[in-house]
Image (cartoon, rainbow, N blue to C red):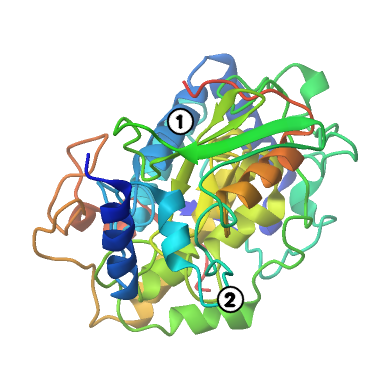
């Protein structure tokens, strides 16, 4: 796998071209690449300006990070967990994010998506997708 | 010829027959396969990879075939049953007849969104959710909380006026009728209704809520209406396109049905009225 820096540059160039393209890897790094002059991440970018997140939200531990390997072939290359259980996520062509529990409602970042999942779960535990 | 009707016009017997057929498929263990199939495509359909059931031109023919197969399954239980449709531009509140105890049952209760009324209430024991994203095994709804308003008739008209069926890159970022109807762009019709119902309808396992079929039946009807209004337009792409189902390519999971086979719904059923 090429260096993250290469990926970030590639990703930025592709996004600037405005194409609905494969965001192949290192989404979190791409966010840094997209940060504007003020340091504010562009809309619909990555997980809130950080490569990863790890926080407790309404009593649930939510974690997100770029997927380490290429086994995430479902349009994400990013992994999100709620209390250690994987939340299936997917990135839309415009850079927004959806998950299996908020499939029809795009969110701007994986962090916002993970928090929305916590609200949706109401304390329930994610189960592996059959 | 089978006629698909507006749910608001169903007789008491037609409602009972439809509900009973749903419950019978569930009892026979044949219902949940539709939930699994739908979710399998939801998670595998991606904007930059293979895409068949969603976010792609074949969203409409794929769901037409999916509904036909399900309707035929219902008819194996009761040949008189056809899928009703929900015109959410007209029946747009949580107190509409659709949500009464003689059809789909009501909104989820506060706290856990559990549906507690009607034939699909968890406590009835007839509608256990087995193909699910989380540990909860009961039907959930949260009408009008994820988004406050269902699409209006004027919004539907604006989408029906779009001339071109679909456009490159043939995904959730496309211009064209299909993507505006699906809802990733424009006023957002189909996706918004999933969000308005909420609960399991907002998930990849959305067919767990029987309202899925009534919603998609209306989406199917709007496709037919667009075809009626734009006779010079047709399904796109017509030429082979990477990762996308073109006009004469067979669709998974059936592998024997192309979008072209699905263009004329009157080979299989008609609708009771134009939009």
Q: Tell me the SS state at disc 2.
A: loop
Q: Which label belongs to residue B146?
A: none
- Between the residue at mark 1 and the residue at mark 2, the CA separation in whole angstroms equals 49 Å
Residue A77 vs residue B200: left or right? left
Label 1 sits on residue: B34
Q: Mark 2 points at which residue?
A: A38
Q: Nearer the viewer, residue B154 or A106?
A: A106
- Does the rendering let one see residue B221? no
Residue that protrudes farthest toward the left in the picture: B239
Q: Do the residues labelled 1 and 2 touch (CB within 8 Å)?
A: no
Is A54 situated above or below B133?
Answer: below
Which chain letter goes with mark 1?
B
Q: Is mark 1 on a helix, strand or loop?
A: helix
- Whether A75 is drawn above or below A71: the answer is below
Residue B212, image x, y percentages: 57, 45
Category of crowding for the residue at label 1, using alpha-carbon neighbours closer than 10 angstroms: few (below 14), some (14–19), many (at least 20): some
Q: x, y (%) of residue B111?
A: 89, 36
User: Dot 2, crowdedness within 10 Å: few (<14), some or many (≥20)?
Assistant: few
Q: Position of residue B153 (x, y in %)?
A: 62, 78
Q: Could you tell me which chain the residue with mark 2 belongs to?
A: A
Residue B177, percent from left and from top: 38, 74
Query: In this view of the protein, which residue sits in the foreground, A25 or B21?
Result: A25
Q: Nearer the viewer, residue B271 or B32?
A: B32
- Front-lying residue, A21 or B151: A21
Could you tell me which residue is drawn at 62 percent across and 58 percent down?
B193
**On screen, B257 above or below B153?**
above
Task: Tell me what residue is drawn at x 37 percent, y 82 percent.
Answer: B229
């Amino acid at each position: 796998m090429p260096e993250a820096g290469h990926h970030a540059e590639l990703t930025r160039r592709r996004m600037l071209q405005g194409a609905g393209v494969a965001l192949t890897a290192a989404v979190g790094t791409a966010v840094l690449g997209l940060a504007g002059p003020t340091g504010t991440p562009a809309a619909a970018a990555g997980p809130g300006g950080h490569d990863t997140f790890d926080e407790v939200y309404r009593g649930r531990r939510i974690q997100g990070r770029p997927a380490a390997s290429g086994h995430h072939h479902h349009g994400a290359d990013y992994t999100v967990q709620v209390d250690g259980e994987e939340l299936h996520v997917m990135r839309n062509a415009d850079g927004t994010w959806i998950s299996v529990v908020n499939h029809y409602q795009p969110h701007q970042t994986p962090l916002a998506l993970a928090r929305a999942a916590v609200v949706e779960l109401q304390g329930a535990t994610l189960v592996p997708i059959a | 010829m089978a006629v698909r009707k507006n749910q608001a016009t169903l007789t008491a017997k037609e409602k009972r027959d439809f509900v009973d057929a749903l419950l019978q498929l569930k009892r026979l263990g044949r219902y949940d396969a539709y939930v699994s199939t739908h979710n399998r495509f939801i998670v595998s359909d991606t904007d930059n990879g293979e895409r068949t059931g969603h976010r792609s031109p074949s969203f409409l023919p794929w769901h037409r075939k999916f509904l036909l197969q399900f309707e035929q399954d219902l008819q194996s239980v009761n040949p008189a049953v056809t899928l009703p449709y929900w015109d959410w531009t007209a029946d747009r509140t949580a107190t509409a007849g659709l949500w009464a105890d003689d059809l789909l049952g009501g909104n989820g209760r506060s706290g856990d969104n559990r549906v507690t009324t009607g034939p699909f209430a968890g406590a009835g024991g007839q509608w256990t959710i087995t193909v699910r994203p989380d540990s909860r095994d009961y039907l959930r709804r949260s009408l009008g909380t994820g988004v406050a308003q269902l699409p209006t008739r004027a919004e539907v008209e604006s989408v029906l006026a779009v001339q071109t069926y679909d456009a490159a890159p043939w995904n959730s970022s496309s211009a064209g009728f299909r993507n505006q109807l699906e809802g990733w762009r424009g006023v957002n019709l189909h996706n918004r209704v999933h969000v308005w119902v909420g609960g399991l309808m907002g998930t990849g396992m959305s067919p767990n809520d029987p309202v899925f079929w009534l919603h998609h039946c209306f989406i199917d009807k709007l496709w037919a209406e667009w075809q009626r209004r734009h006779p010079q337009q047709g399904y796109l792409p017509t030429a082979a396109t990477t990762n996308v189902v073109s006009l004469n390519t067979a669709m998974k999971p059936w592998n024997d049905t192309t979008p072209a086979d699905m263009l004329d719904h009157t080979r299989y059923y008609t609708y009771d009225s134009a939009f």
